[in-house]
Amino acid sequence: MTKTLSAKALAIIKKMQQSELTESVIYEAIAKFAKGEENRQTLLRLAREEKAHYEIWKKYTGLEMKPEKRKVFKYKLLARVLGFTFAVKLMERGEENAQGEYEILAREVEESVHIRQQEEEHEAALLGMLDEERLQYVGSMVLGLNDALVELTGSLAGFVFALQNNRLIALSGLIVGISATFSMASSEFLAARSEGRSDALKSCAYTGVAYLITVILLIAPYLILDSAMYIAALVCMLLIVVLIIAGFTYYTSVAQDQPFGSRFLEMAVISITVAVLSFVVGILAKKFLGIDV
């Protein structure tokens, strides 16, 4: 290009050129294992657009670049574990942060306006890709997760003062948790069948698995810590509750474009409040019933 660019604009172009190439490789790699032909074609279209942007920026820098291997590996792993929708939407969030840089470039590079418009279209295209099985059953997972967090957090907190022994608390929690898992899964199955849904079995499986994983995580501190350290186990359990809520809320906020703060706060307040109330119930039950274990 004959036009002379400022050092700041050239630095931004180099950064964007590297990013476009890397994201093109990521889209293409994820497309190879993404389920659904429409999903694959959308990902490949995005890959082509990103590569085209890379070629435009290369005209300004004159540089031939290679994709960032760590970033490619990171997003391929996220797509495998958490689904391609989550991975690509998380990556697109990074592009939102680059809008300020596009505004700087627009003063010197007219083509940046067109590229920015295409980048904004990416998000609209990705919204049509929310047909992954795991995202279709987020409601079932939320049901299992919420119920397990509220019910088991309350039960374990109540057992803490009543039993004052981590092994007994873990045993009681495991019995309650396993029973509740089967109860919740069967309820979801019957509810789905009554609605005439053909996916009742999958729906109940997602609910049950989410519930069971939550049970295992919440009981873990009572199995790991010494029997007499029941207060420490309770504190660890509450921290795990907050982490589970934060992790799952973040996942759904990215994959389904939902607000993070309000949902996280609501779930956390409910779970912690139930735990505190159940702990008080355990204290009162032990005092007024006069039972020592």
Image: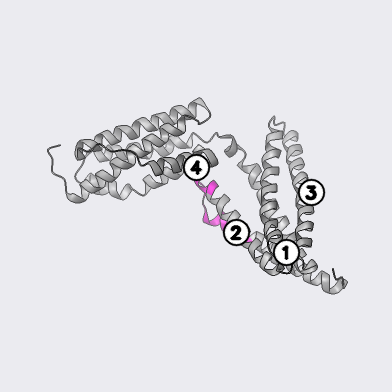
Disc 3: which residue:
179
Q: Where is mark 2, residue-wise?
A: 242
Residue 140 in the image, given as x and y percentages of width and height = 66, 42
Q: Earlier in the sequence, mark 1 or mark 3?
A: 1
**What is the number of the mark on residue 157?**
1
Answer with left or right where residue 164 lies relative to residue 257. right
The residue that disc 4 covers is 78
State which region is magenta.
Answer: 251-269
Query: Residue 2 appears in which quarter of the rendering?
Result: top left
Callouts 1 and 3 close, C-beta under 8 Å? no
Magenta stretch encompasses residue 208: no
Q: Amino acid at mark 2?
A: Val
Figure label count: 4
Q: Residues within 10 Å of mark 4 (few under 14, many from 20)?
A: some
Q: CA distance from mark 4 to mark 3?
A: 33 Å
Element marked by disc 2: helix
